[in-house]
Amino acid sequence: MKQETEIEAVCCPPSETEPEAGPRPIEGPGADEELAVLAKAVGHPARVRILRLLSRKEARVCSQIVDELPLAQSTVSEHLRILKDCGLIRSREEGSRVGYCINYEVLRRLKALVAII
């Protein structure tokens, strides 16, 4: 029970993004570039697996993700960095622990960009 409480403590807070001026286009050069960046981020099976792990639970700490994958901790950290850099996941530091969760706004955007293809 204590471990579950500790995990909940590192859950990511809700995204605090500014409201957009209007809907962003899903076609055109800017949308194509955005799709290419997001597609590259999900272009590795380990990163897809990380997204699936995070989708099953609100947040996970890095050590939990490492335990689920046959990869070194440093490799998992690099995959998490790539997913975070493109905005697909968010993180929150709590002491020496870092919690990760999916950024559903960016995931919805990726789905919209792919749907038009």
Image (cartoon, rainbow, N blue to C red):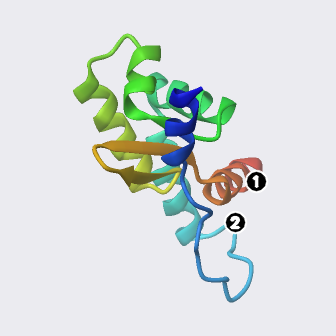
Which residue is denoted by mark 2 in the rendering? 26
**Residue 96 picture location, percent across and down:** 28, 44
**Residue 99 picture location, percent across and down:** 45, 44
Q: Nearer the viewer, residue 114 or 22?
A: 22
- Residue shown at 31%/49% (left/top)? 95
Q: In this view, does 4 lie above or below 97?
A: above
Q: In this view, does 44 lie above or below 69?
A: below
Q: In this view, does 56 lie to the left or right of 78?
A: right
Q: Is residue 30 above or below residue 111?
A: below
- Mark 2 to mark 1: distance in Å? 7 Å
Q: Is residue 29 left or right of residue 98?
A: right
| Residue type indicated by callout 2 | Ile
Picture quadrant where residue 27 is located = bottom right
| Residue type indicated by callout 1 | Ile
Tag 2 near tag 1, CB within 8 Å: yes
Q: Residue placed farthest to the front in the image? A: 2
- Residue shown at 66%/35% (left/top)? 55
- Count of numbered marks: 2
Query: Considering the numbered disc 2 on the image, is that residue within a helix, a strand or a loop?
Result: loop
Q: Nearer the viewer, residue 33 or 70?
A: 70
Q: Residue placed farthest to the bottom in the image? A: 21
